[in-house]
Image: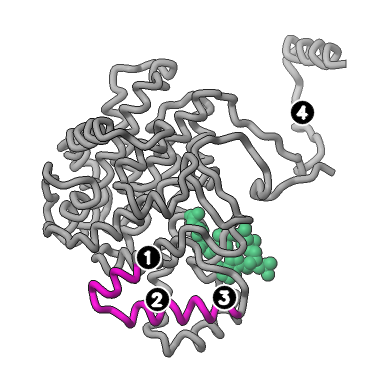
Amino acid sequence: MTDIKKGLAGVVADETAISKVNPETNSLLYRGYPVQELAATQPFEAVAHLLWHGELPTDDELAALRATERAHRTLTPEVIAAIDLVPLDAHPMDEVRTALSLIGAIDLAGRGSVLEASGSVEDNLERSIRLFAALPAIVAYGQRRRHGDEPIAPRDDLDYAANFLWMTFGVEADPVVVDAFNRSMVLYAEHSFNASTFTARVVASALSDLYSAVVAAVGALKGPLHGGANEAVLHIFEEIGDASNVVPWLDDALASKRKIMGFGHRVYKRGDSRVPTMKAALDTLVAHYDRPDVAELYDTLESEFVSRKGIYPNLDYPSGPAYSLIGFDILTFTPLFVAARVTGWTAHIMEQLGSNALIRPLSEYVGPDERHIEGYVPDPAVAEALTRAEEAAG
Ligand code: CMC
């Protein structure tokens, strides 16, 4: 019997130079830099450049990237119209998937052949920046239209994170909030061969285009075992109410074998390296909004769950309450993850294409033994060809 690694757990599928996840030392490096150092010192645009190019940008490179990002911030009327076609009670990830797909179709119009669509290195960098720049507008408008509000035009005087908050809320965010939000974007940007990134690489490996690979990744990220967990954390917080209810709530949840969202990780078994940085950002928001009750609930659930199960929080645990304090709707959390992770996805798509091999694993067949359709008479030419093929195979 073949040794099957269910869920590909523990399987090293390829090399990558983009990030290194080390569960032993509880560290995460983007292109060699510890993620906590990047989150504390770099604007998200610089981290995007690092993921795409391998080095942090010079001042001129950062200015050039920011200029291109600003030039692609506004959604075309077609994309706004496509978002408006998505039912208001559909999940916003469906909206994001639809909008990105249309942006891709419009950009690739005229490249009728699938061979032309896969694009050069330069094409793919341009496409990556286009998606990176459009996502804040898509996510912001998604939240706004659910409140019955019009889209807000981007502000050219604001950098990525501040402009994202501006387009969502229509007020200039406090620097404390911009900083916490920027840190969350940096922490979510990249995490090696997670499910959505691997999905993107699989699609790219077939030499499909970058947009198709990103749209597929959005589908993977929507799942509650992956990106969808950050919104599930807030649903849990809402269910619990306040810290005094944690113990009875957890007793019930564990008795009914519920998974507690925001805890556990396929790779990290002793704690997610991104959590301390995001928890520190959450603490700044708790102080800014004067919401000690959020910190109390967070700490109580964490210490109770960790002491009972020995399973530690992942990044979604602190990011969910942080996004909620900033004012994002729960349904907007996973789209925010897309806005960040699109940088990692596109870096991986380009890396995959740089030394491509079609990703096509094998499977162990466990279905019925060979059987035949009653009364079937084979076409003689087909039968002869099959016999020849069998003989050639020995
Ligand atoms: N709550 C309760 N029990 C858990 C949890 C949890 N959050 N996570 C793992 N366990 C238990 C699980 O029930 C199993 O117990 P048993 O051996 O008795 O059946 C054991 O721990 C191993 O769990 P697993 O699901 O087989 O482990 P995995 O490596 O396949 O799963 C995981 C990793 C992330 C899917 C899982 O921990 C989980 O479902 N967590 C909740 C969802 C979540 O927070 N996802 C976000 C992941 S991090 C962000 C991202 O990458 O997108």
**In contact (CB < 8 Å): disc 2 and disc 1:** yes
The amino acid type found where label 1 is placed reads Gly
Queried whether the magenta region covers residue 301, the answer comes back as: yes
The amino acid type found where label 4 is placed reads Gly
Instruction: Give the residue at mark 3.
Output: 306
Residue at 51% x, 50% y is 28
Q: Which of the 4 image quadrants contains residue 64?
A: top left
Q: Which of the 4 image quadrants contains residue 27?
A: bottom right
Which label was assigned to residue 320?
1
What residue range appears in magenta?
282-307
CA distance separating discs 2 and 3: 16 Å
Which label was assigned to residue 237?
2
Instruction: Give the residue at mark 4.
Output: 375
Of the residues under marks 4 and 3, which one precedes in the sequence? 3
Instruction: Identify which residue, 282 or 87, lies in the foreground.
Output: 282
Q: From the viewer's perspective, is 15 left or right of 203?
A: right
Q: Is residue 85 visible?
A: no
The amino acid type found where label 3 is placed reads Val
Q: Where 160 falls versus 238 (above or below)?
A: above
CA distance separating discs 4 and 1: 61 Å
Considering the image in quadrants, where does the C terminus appear?
top right
